[in-house]
Amino acid sequence: MCFSQAFKARPSLWMLMFVLVCGVWLASGKSFAAVSDISVEPLRAKYAELGEQLRNNQFQRALYLDSSQSSTDLKGEIYAVVDYPFDIVNGALNNPAHWCDVLMLHINVKYCNASRHGDGTVLSVNIGRKYFQPLEDAYRLDFNYRAVVTTPEYFALELNADDGPLSTHDYRIWIEATSLDDGRTFLHVTYAYEFGLIGRLAMQVYLATIGRDKVGFTVTETLSNGHPVYIKGVRGVVERNTMRYYLAIDAYFDALTTSPEDQLEKRLQKWYHSAEQYARQLHEVEREDYLDMKRREYQRQQVAQ
């Protein structure tokens, strides 16, 4: 049976492929750097280096996005200045208890629960389609949270998981942030994973079917009429999901000053509004469909926990 026929015969394989292309935020035991090498200086040097790109870009915000691929792995990165003091960013992100509120904003995250296991925290996340569905039809992933470094002006954290679906492995995410002199914060998010033959074939199926016309954010050329041509393929996948998760972080920050009973609604409205600013890349469902789906998912999550 050929690969495409296998997908038709076994719908669950479509779910596994979907998890692969959703860019689930995981991290492996392979850290991006040794703890002894992690400090605020490289991140502040990057802020100085990206000065012009942060001021002038297509995103209409202080943000720089990059992606890369090799024969065996994919990586997406965002550097951004957020309009929140470092203490707020540190308290929000450098705490595993808050991550489910962030992750649940993503259109494909159906459920999230943080629980203590031994000396660490495990986030159990169900990934699914862009509509409300039973959790047993979603793919569950368990991954670890680890705070790496925390100082009064800098923090770094990572999430850890060695294996994923469809022969993917060594998923890794890295988040670091530092204070800026103007009271804002410079944030860096990196995620990457490696893949084998099955993962590569799954990505090819996706890009030949439902992902055929989807694009990322990198401009590969500008046409004579001035219109940009955006990158496609696997880097487009990485870039779309990098942006979706960054917007989830930003929406979480935006709702922190709202009363607790109103924070969920403000986060949902903010995430959808922000995603629609980049509708060419990120539009998937209509506003009311997204809001209804997420309200039901949050309610289900509260009942389960």
Image (cartoon, rainbow, N blue to C red):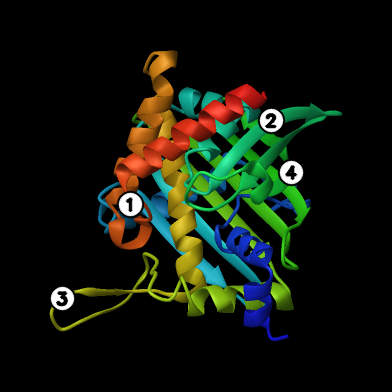
Q: Quadrant of the C terminus?
A: top right
Number of the label disc, if any, that sits on residue 114: 2
Residue named by callout 1: 54
Q: Secondary structure at mark 2?
A: strand
* Mark nearer the viewer, 3 or 2: 2
Residue named by callout 3: 226
Q: CA distance from mark 3 to mark 1?
A: 22 Å
Which amino acid lies under the numbered mark 4 shown in the image of this protein? Asp
* Mark nearer the viewer, 1 or 2: 2
Number of the label disc, if any, that sits on residue 294: none
**Residue 8 in sight from this viewpoint:** yes
Task: Say few, some or many: other residues with alpha carbon within 10 Å of mark 4 (under 14 / 14 to 19 / 20 or more).
Answer: some
**Toward the viewer: 203 or 287?**
287
Q: How many marks?
A: 4
Residue named by callout 4: 142
Q: Earlier in the sequence, mark 3 or mark 2?
A: 2
Point out residue 237 in the picture as x, y percentages from the top left corner. 49, 65
Q: CA distance from mark 1 to mark 2?
A: 34 Å
Point out residue 104 in the picture as x, y percentages from the top left corner. 53, 38
Which amino acid lies under the numbered mark 2 shown in the image of this protein? Ala
Residue 86 placement, left or right of 222? right
Looking at the picture, does residue 203 appear above or below residue 38? Answer: below
* Mark nearer the viewer, 3 or 1: 3
Q: Earlier in the sequence, mark 3 or mark 4?
A: 4
Which amino acid lies under the numbered mark 1 shown in the image of this protein? Leu
Point out residue 281 in the picture as x, y percentages from the top left corner. 35, 61
Q: Residue at x 42, y 58 (%)?
A: 65
Point out residue 290 in the picture as x, y percentages from the top left corner. 39, 42
Q: CA distance from mark 1 to mark 4?
A: 35 Å
Q: CA distance from mark 3 to mark 4?
A: 45 Å
